[in-house]
Image: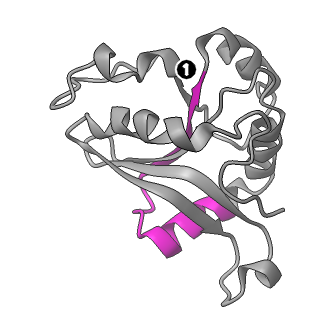
Amino acid sequence: MEESPGTHGADVGKGHFEGVVLDSPRAYRALFVNSQCYIQLNEGSNPDTSGPHWYFDALAVSFKERAAFLCEITYAARAASLIVRLKAWNEHWPGVSVAMERDSGEPAEWIVRPWLFVLEAHIANLRYAIGGLTNLPSPRFTPLEEVVPWRYRSWDRGAYVDPSP
């Protein structure tokens, strides 16, 4: 069940662009980003034997929204690995929430949800592919085309308007 960082199929070179993507949420003054985070559902000293666990591209925390976002970045057309991961999170979502509280100190009353950075042309198909996931909160989507540094002010990105339902 464990995936190492950067294994989303066609995303072999993702690491080179990942920093650019993660600079985008960092430009919001109320968001704090920790890259290459880890979720371990069951406590244990060896994650390989303790049960389900995942690395994810970043954890973004918003004090203003009282929310934590599990960020995933892909520019794969079908995003098969990302869909598999989201289905696994859906299956284990109560445990993911508990692990976030236990290991990251995220307050129990905060919202935890995925934040997906994908190519704009693939957002509708990805929404459709994960539409039946009932445990997983509705992900926030950001088109990769919007995260390039010339599309926003780096010192204060301004208020975010979330079009996700």
Residue at image coords 53%, 61%: 37
Q: Residues within 10 Å of mark 1 (few under 14, many from 20)?
A: few
Residue 33 horizontal/vertical position (percent):
37, 50
Residue 38 horizontal/vertical position (percent):
59, 65
Residue at image coords 69%, 61%: 54
Describe residue 53's horizontal placement relative to residue 78 as left or right.
left
**Stretch in magenta:** 95-118
Check the picture and name the quadrant holding the C terminus.
top right
Residue 99 falls in image quadrant = bottom right
Residue 14 falls in image quadrant = top right
Describe residue 58's horizontal placement relative to residue 6 as left or right.
left
Q: Mark 1 falls on what kind of element?
A: loop
Q: Is residue 98 visible?
A: no
Mark 1 highlights which residue?
165
Residue furthest left as drawn: 155
Residue 156 horizontal/vertical position (percent):
17, 29
Check the picture and name the quadrant holding the N terminus.
bottom right
Residue furthest bottom as drawn: 45
